[in-house]
Amino acid sequence: MQVALVQLSATTDAAANRTSVDDVLGTFGPHDGLDLVVLPEGTMHDFGDPSHDLRSAAEPLDGPFATLLADHAKRLGAYVVAGAFEARADASGEPDLPYNVLLAFAPDGTLAASYRKIHLYDSFGYAESERLVAGDVAPVVLDVAGRRVGLMTCYDLRFPEMARMLVDAGADVLCVPAAWVRGPLKEDHWTTLLRARAIENTVDVLAADQYGKYVGHSMVVDPLGVVVAAAGEEAAVVRASLSVDRLGRARSTNPSLANRRIGVPAPAAADGGDEGRAS
């Protein structure tokens, strides 16, 4: 599977962000043979300062940002995943707190999936739950070029059960768009947790982060925890090829999923078959 991670710095000007995304995605073409392009959390509109009301920034799932992504997905013949804020209304029809959402568009330009961030960043002195609402606890997994790609967002990375839920749903790739804020030890946490999720689940990890007030360092990590491609602290595109053979060798060398005895999902088939099991 051929992947590209886009590391960018979004602003609170949604129109300017669309122009930036259009420019960078326009550097890709069908000749690149990409299967999946990943952009960071909050690409549609940055979080801004804590007083910034994200309800006014949120868009529907067929809004201008989504339309831009859909057009590029269709042009490239690839899946495109990016972070946005999804508009919600309360019972009276007034704007309510939005979702922090990942939009995943298929090569035909249709919305293949939307993942609403489960774990809101109420940590390190910040309260994301005051500005956004959490999604339901359910795995979102895409079929991309013969691989199963599980979607998670930023702070979700700190919860190993989140990654394992996706793996139990069949994911062998974790896709992690993020806006991982800078701070003491934050870069170390980012790189350590990405490698840990790869190692403990024997999966590839694709992490696309913003830079600037965020740590950057978007990277691709293989199922044995090796960082195979990475960006620094500036705008960048990270490309990599994910190997099914490498995945198989990793799971043969480190069969931790097959060996685990805690939290193993029961077989779906009554005859003792292994449907529904992670392996």
Image (tube, rainbow, N blue to C red):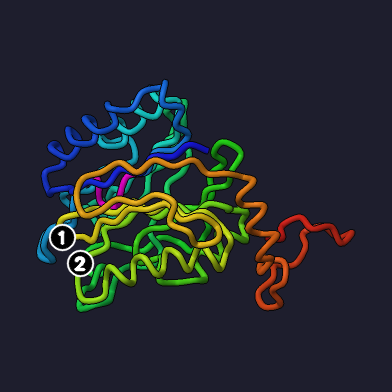
- The span shown in magenta is 39-44
| Residue at the far right in the pictured view | 271
Callout 1, which amino acid? Lys
Closer to us: 151 or 233:
233
Residue at the image point whose x is 24% and y is 33% from the top: 24
Q: Return the residue nearer the eye: 217 or 75.
A: 217
Q: Is residue 275 visible from the viewing direction of this image? A: yes
Q: Position of residue 106 (x, y in %)?
A: 46, 33
In the image, residue 235 sits, relative to residue 225, either above or below, namely above
On residue 17, the disc is none
x, y percentage for residue 23? 21, 30
Q: Residue at x 17, y 40 (%)?
A: 17
Instruction: Specify whether residue 141 is painted magenta.
Output: no
Q: Residue at x 65, y 74 (%)?
A: 263
Query: Around disc 1, counting alpha carbons within 10 Å, would you say few (fewer than 14), some (14 to 19), or many (20 or more)?
Result: few
Circle 2 sits in a helix, a strand or a loop, which is it? loop
Give the residue at mark 2: 182
Judge whether residue 90 can be spotted in this image.
no
Q: Are marks 2 and 1 in contact (CB under 8 Å)?
A: yes
Q: Picture coordinates of residue 147 (x, y %)?
A: 58, 43
User: What kind of residue is marked 2?
Assistant: Arg
Q: Estimate how packed mark 2 is, as few (under 14), some (14 to 19) or many (20 or more) residues with alpha carbons within 10 Å.
A: some
Residue at the disc numbered 1: 213
Of the numbered discs 2 and 1, the one sitting upstream in the chain is: 2
